Image (tube, rainbow, N blue to C red):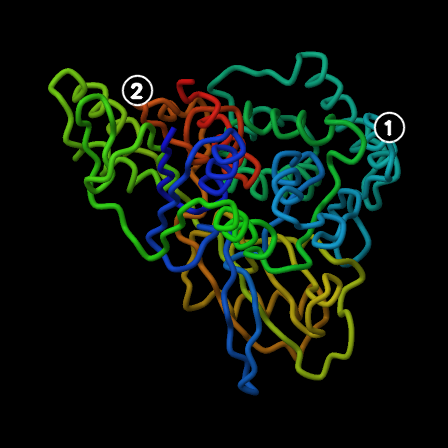
Amino acid sequence: MRVCVVGAGWGGIAAALNAAESGHRVTLIEAARDVGGRARTLAVTRADGSTLELDNGQHILIGAYGECLRLMRLVGVDPQTALHREPLALSFPDGSGLALPDRAPPWDALTGIARARGWSWREKLALLSRAAHWRMRGFRCAPGTTVAQLCAGLPRRLADEFIAPLCVSALNTPPESASGQVFLTVLRDSLFAGRGGSHLLLPRAPLGALLPEPALRWLTRHGHAVRLGSRVRRLAMHEGRWQVDDEPFDAVLLACTSTEAARLVREADAPALARAPLQAWASAADPLGFGAIATVYAEQPDARGPMLARAMLALRATATRPAQFVFDRARLGGPAGVLAFVVSAFSGERDTLSDQVLKQAREQLGLRALQPLQTVVEKRAAFICAPALARPPRTIAPGLQACGDYVDGPWPATLEGAVRHGLAAVQNLAP
């Protein structure tokens, strides 16, 4: 089959690779001149004029991201060297918090909770009891349940220092408005996915080098077409086949944003009988809300090595001290003195963000010589993962599928979710 993939984010890359592996002829079209979508590499100019490769956001993978890791290996990237692996830890600068040992589940979680520093035994037992309850119920809850309702009754410290950071990092949605069911799915697929499933995988290489850029080289080397800087204007159905800007294909996979996919579907030139389902799908994609993730990069010019005790530390976030996590790029193979502060579910003012984060670094990390380097705000970083959210289906019409992370499924807006939807879209193609 001739398959067109529109969009070269991680979902589109996965769809293109899987279609090529399945023996189809692939044309990958991307409106931007860079690949990776919301997980891409940026070039930043430092004060001394040198150029530093950073990402549009500090992303985290986990050991349970099996499809991401498989595709990386397919295109010649070794995850063991490209990613820094360590057991899951939500440790704060003062040494308090949770750090799991490298053991098989559930012993890693049980041991980690029992050894958590700064938590009372009452708090530890409360979390163990609630986790056992969730597991006994098969990690299921009522569709309209929020994470805050799911965790009601837990001690305040656990809600603030464990549930909230885990929720906003995984769902990019505050616990008060986040889906309890999706949160439970994340816990099931990470903490109980087998040994190493909950491990943190922190990129040592720029995001573009992990998968998107090697994937383009792989596709080109195997004879498939890649077109960057080319925005698709229109779709049309003619004699049972889809046309992309008048070029015929047997199948089209929309891996662009939900907004762009809705535009293309709504404006598609199709027979009268096909228009109703197309309009229905576009109407389902349009209402999706999106939240921002901000990353504040800062550097200490005189640093000669790592500045933090770990590659990643949790921070105590407030309205005026908004970062939930900080990453030491030197511990990830990057330059000394560069830190990345992540603000998930960001809703503040960009103009004041850098100043607030630098004050947070002084107060919580004792770092007083940090200078702002770059602030990146990805405004549509992830869909707002609300309870009972109605997400559009993957199948739009015969031969036309959507494979963004926003389509109907159990996962939040993660790299693995996007990749799995891309793979599933190819599997749904007619033989």
Identity of the residue drawn at 77% across and 21% down:
129
Instruction: Please indicate, yes or no, whether residue 180 appears anywhere in the rendered image.
Output: yes
Identity of the residue drawn at 59% across and 51% down:
59
- For the N terminus, the image quarter is top left
Farthest residue to the bottom: give it: 48
Give amino acid for label 2.
Answer: Pro
Which dot marks residue 288?
Answer: none
Q: Where residue 81 sits in the image (x, y, percent)?
A: 75, 54
Is 300 or 418 nearer to us in this picture? 418
Q: Where residue 77 sits in the image (x, y, percent)?
A: 66, 50
Farthest residue to the top: give it: 137
Q: Position of 219 compared to 110: left or right?
A: left
Quick one: SS at disc 1? helix
Q: Where residue 357 sits in the image (x, y, percent)?
A: 57, 65
User: Closer to the camera: disc 1 or disc 2?
Assistant: 2
Sequence order check: which comes first, mark 1 or mark 2?
Answer: 1
Which dot marks residue 107?
Answer: 1
Q: How many marks?
A: 2
Choose top left, top right, bottom left or bottom right for residue 188: top right
Instruction: Please indicate, yes or no, whether residue 174 appears anywhere in the rendered image.
Output: no
Give amino acid for label 1.
Answer: Trp
Mark 2, residue position? 398
Q: Position of 88 compared to 273: left or right?
A: right
